[in-house]
Image (spheres, helix red, strand yellow):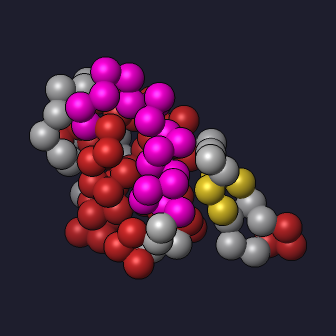
Amino acid sequence: MLDDRTRALLLALLYPVQFDARPELGISRVLKQVVGRNALQATPSDYLRAIETALQSRDEELADIIPQTHSEAAIRSYLQQLSRSFVAAPRGGEPFARS
């Protein structure tokens, strides 16, 4: 089961694309509006950790985090694609979001 903070971070990443026919097309927008602005006082590492935790959880219905019409597979695919938009900073520093 996901903790409240992880669920909140995921909700922030899902909210901007909940009505998009293809959520993956909104990744750039999410990176700019949510991750890039440190929404919820979260770092890119916080968001990436939330995504990784969610994707590892096979018993959690990620599509139920926010009311929307996408399938579980579509939400997991979106989060996988979003996670690939994070790159490690040089010398092991804070990962940043690539928009």
The magenta stretch is: 18-36
Residue at the image point whose x is 71% and y is 54% from the top: 87
Closest to the observer, 29 or 7: 29
Is 85 placed left or right of 50 in the picture?
A: right
Closest to the observer, 37 or 50: 37
Residue 63 x, y percent position in the rendering: 23, 37
Is 48 placed left or right of 17 in the picture?
A: right
Residue at the right extreme of this rendering = 91
Q: How many marks?
A: 0
Q: Is residue 33 magenta?
A: yes
Residue 34 x, y percent position in the rendering: 42, 59
Residue at the left extreme of this rendering = 67
Which quarter of the rendering shows the N terminus? Answer: bottom left
Report the predominant secondary structure element of the magenta stretch: helix
Q: Is residue 60 visible?
A: no
Residue 47 x, y percent position in the rendering: 47, 61
Residue at the image point whose x is 47% and y is 29% from the top: 25
Residue at the image point whose x is 32% and y is 57% from the top: 12
Residue at the image point whose x is 26% and y is 24% from the top: 71
Q: Is residue 70 magenta?
A: no
